[in-house]
Image (cartoon, rainbow, N blue to C red):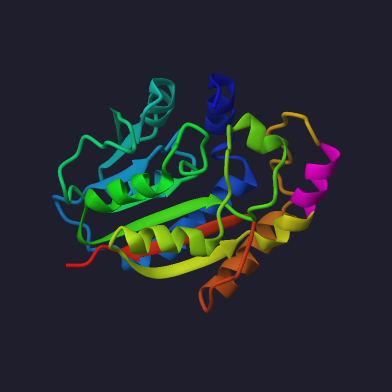
Amino acid sequence: MDVDEYRRMAEAGNRHWWYRSTRALLEQLVAPHLPPVGPATRYLDAAGGSGATGSWLAARGQTAVDDVDEQSVRFAIETPGYVGVIADLNHLPHPNGSFDAVLCVTALCHRMNRDPASTVSELVRVTRPGGIVCLMEPGVRWLRRGHDRVTHTARRFSRRDLAAMLDEAGADVLRSTGAYTFLVPPAALLAVVERGKETSDVGRNESGLAGAFGGLARAERAILTRMNLPTGLSAIAVARVPG
């Protein structure tokens, strides 16, 4: 991802409806499974970028943000609670069982990541027994659009893809669900309209159609308190490391 895109993410983090909704969504899905916060509590936001989606975790306790890109880490540590670490996600510089929870948002999809399953194994390795790993990635495998080209997205996932990688890494899957189902039709239309172009969603339609998308996201989160969704523009899986 280029520097301008990181800058746009950092600037949009507190304004754009998608970032606000995603923080609320991840906290809703993950927080109930987290171990109690204590003096030794530590979290990892893997490839956390600007902190736009993981700052809720940093607000709970000290959170490392690991990324191979120094520019990304520089943006992330501007968020209170974050500690930056330059690191390859497939070879994390942390001992086994270092973190109470690990969050990884839109890193497995990146074209630089040649082996997403290896990354998931590393994320599980550095999570303490009883700790939580949460993955969130672009959903709908067949959907390819301009935003993917800007963010160097090489692949998309189903919720079952994410659950299978966590299971193979030895974690017990608690939830696997689609999210932002209401965005699939407009995203598919944009894929046709913007065919061959590079266009970023960051900064676009920050209000979410004057709050309509934010309202739909809240309604979807209410549904997710009761059930998983089979698909969506995002795929999410939450798992616990045994022990």
Residue occupying image coordinates x 43% and y 63%: 163
Return the x and y of residue 95 as percentages of the image width and height: 15, 43
Return the x and y of residue 105 as percentages of the image width and height: 46, 46
Which residue is most to the bottom? Answer: 226
The residue nearer to you, when weighing 111 against 181, is 111
Q: Quadrant of the N terminus?
A: top right
> Magenta segment: does it hold 115?
no
In this view, 137 is above or below 180: above
**Does the magenta stretch mainly form a helix, a strand or a loop?**
helix
Q: Is residue 16 left or right of residue 173?
A: right
Which residue is most to the right? Answer: 193
Residue occupying image coordinates x 41% and y 38%: 48
Return the x and y of residue 8 as percentages of the image width and height: 59, 28
Residue occupying image coordinates x 57% and y 67%: 221
| Quarter of the figure with residue 100 | bottom left
> Magenta segment: does it hold 190?
yes
The residue nearer to you, when weighing 184 against 51, is 184
Q: Which residues are magenta?
A: 186-194
In this view, 83 is above or below 38: above
Return the x and y of residue 5 as percentages of the image width and height: 58, 26
Q: Is residue 176 left or right of residue 189?
A: left
In this orientation, does residue 123 appear? yes
The residue nearer to you, when weighing 207 against 3, is 3
Residue occupying image coordinates x 63% and y 47%: 17
Q: Quadrant of the C terminus?
A: bottom left
